[in-house]
Structure formats: C-alpha cells, structure tokens
Image (tube, rainbow, N blue to C red):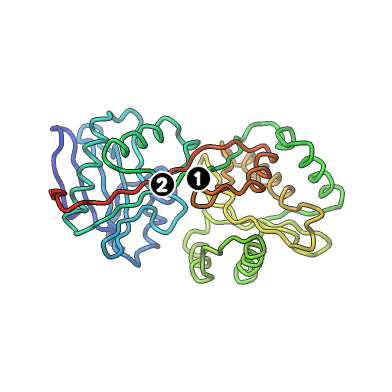
Amino acid sequence: MIFSQLIEKEYLFQVYQLNQANYIPEGMYLFNTNQYLQNQLQNTIFSFSLQSMRLKHSECLLHVSIKDTLAVSPVKATFGGIEIHQGLPDSLLDLFIQHVDQFLCSQNIHQVKLTNYPFAYNLSAAQKITAALLRNGYTIDNSEVNYHIPVTNEPLEKRMHYSEKRRLRKCVQSGMIFKEEKSPDLSKIHTFIHQARIRKGFPMTLTLETFRNLFMQMPNVYRVFVAIYRDELAALTVTVRINKDILYNFYPADNEYFLNYSPSVFITSEVYKIAQQEGYKMVDLGIATDQSVPNYGLMRFKSNLGAENSLRLSFCKRFNDNATSL
C-alpha cells in the first residue's frame, strides 16, 4: 500500500501499486482480479479501494494502468472500471471518485478513461456508477451496445428467430460435431481467428504471444471449442469465465468455406449448452458496435440468436491546472 486515508470515520481510502509480491482487493469480474492483473504488469498499475473497517471488505474498487499522463481502466481487457458493493451510499461513491481523481492529479495524470462492465451484469450498480461519474465531471466517451443471452433450462433454439433455427438444424443434420479442444494448437487457433476477423473487417486485438500467455497462465479461464465438419474446422470460439455466473463468448470465428452452413449459429447453441451444464446465468456475446458506430448486420445476427442488449459505457475526464491533490 502506498497511501491510506480515513473517510467518514468508518472507511479507509487505500491506494496500492500492483506488483508480483502484493495482492489487492478482488473484484467480482475477471478483469478486476489479481489472477488477471498479475499478468498485466508491463505498465504501472494503481489499485484504489474503499475499505469498510466494520465489515472488513472492500465497498468500492478501481484499477488503472498508467501510461505517461493517461490513466486507463481496463488494464488490457474488454472492460474494467469501478465496481461497488451492493448498498454503497451515493455520498461514499462520490467521495471515492473524488479521492481517486485527487490522487491521480498528484501523480501528474492529465486524463482518465474508464470502461465499465455491461449494464446487464448488474443494472442497478451500473446505473449508480454512471450517475456518480457524470456528477463528478466525467463525460460519456463511447456508448456501446452489448449482447447477452440469459441462461435458462430451455434450449437456445426456443429463443432463436426462425431463420437461425433453420440454420442450426442444417448444421445438426449435416453431422457437424462440437467439442472442446483440451490441448489446442494456439498458433493455429490464433491464425484461424485472425483470418476470420480480417475477412469481416475486425482487428485482431491480441498478439500470438499474449494469446498464448492467457491460456498458459489462466487455463481454468480460457477455453477453445470447435465445430468440425467432415474432419475440417468449420468454426471455433474462445470462451472466458468472467465469474461463476457469466461466460463470455470472446473470440468466435468461422471458416469462409462453410458459411452456407452458418456454423457460428451451431457453435453458439453448443456453448449455451455448456453454460447450462456448468451453472452459468448468462452468456455474454460482446458488443455489436465500434466506437459507438453500430454494425447493423452483427446486431441483427445476435438478436436473431435470441440475445438481449444493454449498454456498455466508457467515460473520460480531463484534469485542469486547478485540480487539487491529496
């Protein structure tokens, strides 16, 4: 810990600088946990916590990566941002944000960018955090539309549009096989994903080295599932365990030679079954926008799969010369 200050008699505002020798207060979601952040130490990481001295747990937390005069959350991930404990008063959340800002100013930080989790993860908390950030001088930088499928006891096919039901049945009737790759060839998997994303105009967000490291360092979190048609790889996806309730369909990719079968529909249906079997409450399909610009085809595809949408907001704040330090 590098800083600690008593707030409202009962709470400690604490600042940590993460390194391999220390462990910080844990978040509810993967990208705010020690397990993930310990693998992202290329830049300085500051971790902020509001600790309840009476309840002995963190009521509020935020992790930011520092690069020059910019502080960013998430730390090389899909989202990060602020997490709060249920029932945290608005006044304390405001004080937490203000103390974070003041500390960052003291470190010569000029700008903060935060991307929070999708509203669907925890609607009431996301709304409270959004309102608090806006009250404290942050502005909405990007508004993305995220899609998720609630996991129930019913098959996914019941939620699908009739066109996707038809495509799913075509895959099943063709004898397409779904399985998990227990020992995946990560170089081949990465190349397959890269080719599919380039074809669709999406960037490849992870280098091969980073991709490998994620699997090696968190084998219980990252998994590969494939769809095979007549011994050929028709489609695959990489899933990420966000927590015990949320499975993230992170890197879906298909083979252009099998697009007439729509193997992505088949593989999504099978991943949904995995989520049912393993007790997840949600399959996160990710965003269908880019820097707030909608991809209407992708939005339609995810909706037709039976997914629901929610906001995923990014916030920005610039500090002026009059900002005060702690």
Q: Residue at x 52, y 59 (%)?
A: 219
Asked if labels 2 and 1 touch by Cβ distance under 8 angstroms, the answer is yes
Residue 131 placed where, x, y %? 34, 33
Q: Secondary structure at mark 1?
A: strand
Residue 293 placed where, x, y %? 54, 49
Answer left or right for 225 relative to 51: right
Amino acid, disc 2: Ser
Q: Residue at x 19, y 51 (%)?
A: 103
Q: Which residue is mark 1?
A: 144
Answer left or right for 221 relative to 299: left
| Residue 235, quarter of the rendered image | bottom right
| Residue 181, quarter of the rendered image | bottom right
Q: Which residue is mark 2?
A: 314
Check disc 2: other Cα within 10 Å, few if <14, some if 14-19, many if 20+: many
Q: Earlier in the sequence, mark 1 or mark 2?
A: 1
Amino acid, disc 1: Glu
Check disc 1: other Cα within 10 Å, few if <14, some if 14-19, many if 20+: many
Residue 321 placed where, x, y %? 16, 53
